[in-house]
Image (tube, helix red, strand yellow):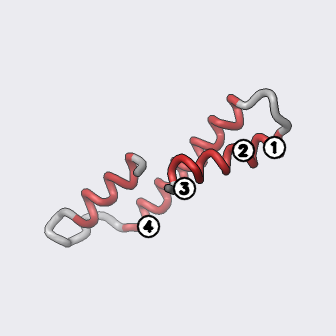
């Protein structure tokens, strides 16, 4: 679970069952967080081609954050 997913659960589901923020904000924040992780991985992966690095970054994200 990412920090954004945790915050989403806290704010959307634990406040007496009444959401206090729009879920769309969390969807956007999660996509931004994913892109930050992918970009960081790609920058750090200096040994691969751009295409391989992008593929490896997606694979890393899925294995690390989507289990």
Q: How far is the residue under mark 1 from the one under mark 3? A: 21 Å
Q: Which residue is mark 1?
A: 52
- SS at badge 2: helix
Q: Secondary structure at mark 4?
A: helix
Mark 1 or 3: the one toward you: 1
**Mark 1–mark 3 contact, CB under 8 Å?**
no
Which of the two discs, 2 and 3, sits closer to the camera?
Answer: 2
Mark 2 touches mark 1? (CB < 8 Å): yes
Q: Residues within 10 Å of mark 1 (few under 14, many from 20)?
A: few
Looking at the image, is 38 positioned above or below residue 30? Answer: above
Q: Which residue is mark 3?
A: 31
Spatial separation of the CA atoms under disc 4 and disc 3: 11 Å
Q: Position of residue 64 (x, y in %)?
A: 53, 46
* Residue labelled with disc 2: 56
Q: Secondary structure at mark 1?
A: helix
How far apart are labels 2 and 3 at the CA level? 18 Å
Quadrant hosting residue 8? bottom left
Relative to residue 62, is residue 65 drawn left or right? left
């Amino acid at each position: 679970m990412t920090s954004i997913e945790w915050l989403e659960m806290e704010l959307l589901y634990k406040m007496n069952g009444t959401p206090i923020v729009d879920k769309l904000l969390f969807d956007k924040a999660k996509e931004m967080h994913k892109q930050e992780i992918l970009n960081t991985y790609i920058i750090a992966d200096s040994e691969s081609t751009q295409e391989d690095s992008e593929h490896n970054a997606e694979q890393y994200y899925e294995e690390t954050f989507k289990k």
